[in-house]
Amino acid sequence: MIEFGSDFHCIDNHSYGSIHLTDLFHDTTLLADGRQCIVVLIRQYGWKRIWLPDYYCYEVIDTIRAQTGIETAFYEDNPLHEGNVNNLPFAQGDVLLRMNLYGLRGQRSNKGIICPVIEDHSHDPSGEWALNSDADWCISSIRKTLPVPEGGMMWSPKGYQLTDKVDVLAENEQMAAIRWKAMEMKAAYLKGEDVNKDDFRTLFLKTEGWFDSAEPALIDKRSRDVVLNKLDIKLWQEARHRNWSLLNSLVNKDGCSVLKPQDESCTAFSFVFEFECRERRDAVRKRLIESGVYPAILWTVPDSASEQSKDFSNRMLSIHCDGRYNEEDIRQLADRLNKALGKR
């Protein structure tokens, strides 16, 4: 039985072509993870305080705090409510981080914002907003959208340069090799070969925690080769867009809603459900896992977050429908979703 979601498996039949992600932007740098890009920038500029959406990955925030000592401030911003960043009480030494949550938002401008701006395009790294950004810097945790075990990309739409050198680190190469092994094992498992699922899950879990404290490093050589030379980002993006649209046409949405991209220029990161209550969400999640579909809660936010951000976190589910799947796969996924959603 095919399983859906969770970490990428190793995909050998990349969509080869001439358009690669790094070709779309000027002077990109590839690090091991997206959060490392933010850490490098804070260290370079010496910013004292960073403004962050209160709906964000707090494991990333913990790493930023631990590795830079920067003060963190939050503004209300979640998939149901876009925060007004223009009226924040910025001070000297501040930097603002904005995020295209789930890849649902079209282009935004930073005109009138009086402090430097970092944009996080992890959920749609080659979308319209990323391509036309006017931020000081952009970052993306590309391991979240591309079939590689690690990877973060950074570039400056304003042409700024990194002044602090980041090197290849042996520890990172070793960690990435373990994650590549886990991806290969998962691919064999999905093909029905004699592979113990717990073995590759253990490798994924063991190495995922590495990103929490790892020093910034250049992306591992094998992942770099996939991003720079193999995976055609245009074909991959088209597959993501096509799969989301097909799934949206097949899924019964009684008792829930699906978050939709702002327009056709956006490519959704995943298929995001909003349920009427947490109990319904948790029941559907349980049935999906039993059927081999592994949804994600992106993200669990702390009590300090706004009431709306906490409420949405308690009622959402994210379903992967990216370029690793073909049309037949998506139809199977829709069937399992409908069965899980149909039970009360």
Image (cartoon, rainbow, N blue to C red):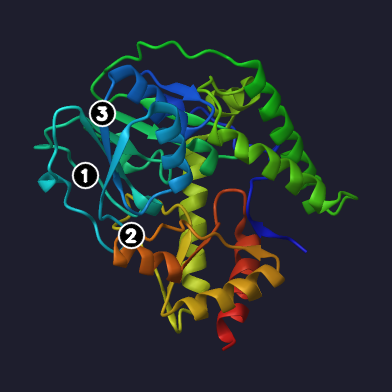
- What's under tag 2, amino acid-wise? Pro
Q: Given contact means CB atoms under 8 Å apart, are the residues at marks 3 and 1 in contact?
A: no
Separation of disc 3 and disc 1 at Cα? 25 Å
Q: Nearer the viewer, residue 257 or 267?
A: 257
Query: Which type of secondary structure does the marked residue at label 2 adopt?
Result: loop
Say whether disc 3 or disc 1 marks the residue closer to the N-terminus.
3
Residue 169: image location, x then y, percent:
60, 16
Residue at 53%, 12% in the rendered image? 167
Q: Which SS class for mark 1? A: loop
Q: What residue is shown with label 3?
A: 48
Whichever of labels 3 and 2 marks the residue nearer the N terminus, that label is: 3
Residue 3: x and y in percent read 70, 60
The residue lying at 29 percent from left, 61 percent from top is: 306
Q: Amino acid at mark 1?
A: Arg
Q: Residues within 10 Å of mark 3 (few under 14, many from 20)?
A: some
With respect to residue 20, does 242 lie above or below?
A: below
Q: Secondary structure at mark 3?
A: loop
Q: Which residue is mark 2?
A: 79
User: Vertically, is 175 above or below 54?
Assistant: above
Q: Mark 2 packing: few (<14 Cα in 10 Å), some, or many (20+)?
A: some
Query: How far, Cα to Cα, is label 3 from label 2?
Result: 27 Å
Q: Which residue is mark 1?
A: 108
Residue 304 rendering spot, x and y as whole percentages: 34, 57
Locate residue 41: give its quadrant: top left
